[in-house]
Amino acid sequence: MGHRTPGDVRSAFTGRFADAARDIDARDQIMLGLPPDRRPEALALAKELGFTFYVFCAGVDWPEAERMEVLDQVFDPHALLRLTLRYDLPRTKPVLPSGTGVYAGANWYERETYELFGIGFTGHPRLSRLFLPDWFEGHPLRKDFELEARVEKPWPGASFEG
């Protein structure tokens, strides 16, 4: 594909997603915010542009803003560029399309994000638990999840007055 710059990648995405993409990070790492329903299309464009390695999918919980995020990071080994695609989701019933049809490597990460954050992925071939037992209730990486260890023993880093 030749030598590509972050500007070239941004241009390709804003050309295809002109009404949706917005550059949220101007450093050498490329980060674009996109609507969740266009995730498979965005991942397909990334792959078409040479981002052949799927690095990760991760969830972020923003309870004060009543939203969650999912981040996809892909890598172009020839141009040595990283691209992070960000999708905003509502905190109640967060769901977005699976990226496994574009990158098989998304499978495990989507399962992890589902289990730990409660974010669903429509079209995922086998959205099931990876780490926690079947009887476990809740999503431990959400900020409203109460850690039993903090109930039994106060966190030593908490600030105390007096």
Image: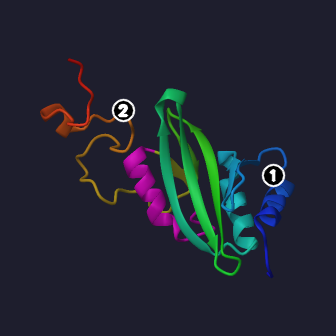
Specify the amino acid type for callout 1: Phe
Question: On the image, numbered disc 1 is attached to which residue?
Answer: 17
Which residue appears at 79% of the width and 79% of the height? 3
Nearest to N terminus: mark 2 or mark 1: 1
Residue 2 on the magenta segment: no
Along the horizontal axis of the image, is 54 left or right of 23? left
Query: What is the x, y in percent for residue 117?
Result: 42, 45
Residue type at tag 2: Asp
Q: Can residue 100 be seen in this snapshot?
A: yes
Measured from the top left, where is residue 46 in percent x and y?
71, 66
Task: Give the residue at mark 2.
Answer: 144
Q: Residue at x 55, y 71 (%)?
A: 104
Q: Main secondary structure of the magenta part?
A: helix
Q: Quadrant of residue 130?
A: bottom left
The quarter of the picture where the N terminus appears is: bottom right
Q: Can the viewer see residue 98?
A: no
From which residue to which does the magenta span run? Answer: 99-118
